[in-house]
Amino acid sequence: MENQSAIAFVIPGTPVGKGRPKFARRGNFVTTYTPEKTASYENLVKLKAQEAMMGRPMIEGPVAVQIALHVTPPVSWSQKKQVSALAREIRPTTKPDMDNVIKGIFDAMNEIVWRDDKQVCELIVVKLYSPAAEAKVEVWPI
């Protein structure tokens, strides 16, 4: 097996937590569908992951993942409070929930970066205030 280095990419925009499936009645049948916001974020993740892979084969075996979720401080906050948030003196305790964002990112990376997210054996995640909303993802074989 060739030596594979880390795959890193940035997903622009506010991180989106994976929404619960929705249900709709179609005549006598009930169908499930993924909420639009979730589907569109997962498609963006897929695109960025494919770009980062640059045609490399999927990683086989165990992987480690590091994710940094960056959210912007509320504009309603005072300038002083925003500066504190950007200096990491205040941490975001608001939505999106970190675990829901991870689930959406991992699901989108299936069959692109790795076969299945069950290969993830190590995970480091932080949620921080930042001037630009984005998610930074790094994956490497272990």
Image (spheres, rainbow, N blue to C red):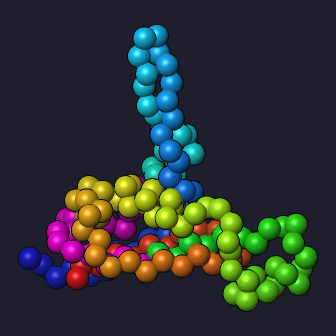
* Span of residues in magenta: 44-66
* The quarter of the displayed image where residue 37 is located: top right
Residue farthest along the left direction in this orientation:
1
Nearer to the camera, 55 or 22: 22
Q: Is residue 5 magenta?
A: no
Q: Position of residue 112 (x, y in %)?
A: 29, 58
- Whether residue 57 is situated above or below residue 47 in the rendered picture: below
Q: Quadrant of the N terminus?
A: bottom left
**Which residue is pictured at 61% across the width and 73% down the height?**
70
Count of marks placed on residues: 0
Q: Position of residue 53 (x, y in %)?
A: 31, 66
| Left or right relative to 105: residue 81 | right
Nearer to the camera, 121 or 107: 121
Q: Position of residue 25 (x, y in %)?
A: 49, 19
Q: Quadrant of the C terminus?
A: bottom left
**Which residue is pictured at 54% across the width and 79% down the height?**
126
- Whether residue 114 is situated above or below residue 137 in the rendered picture: above
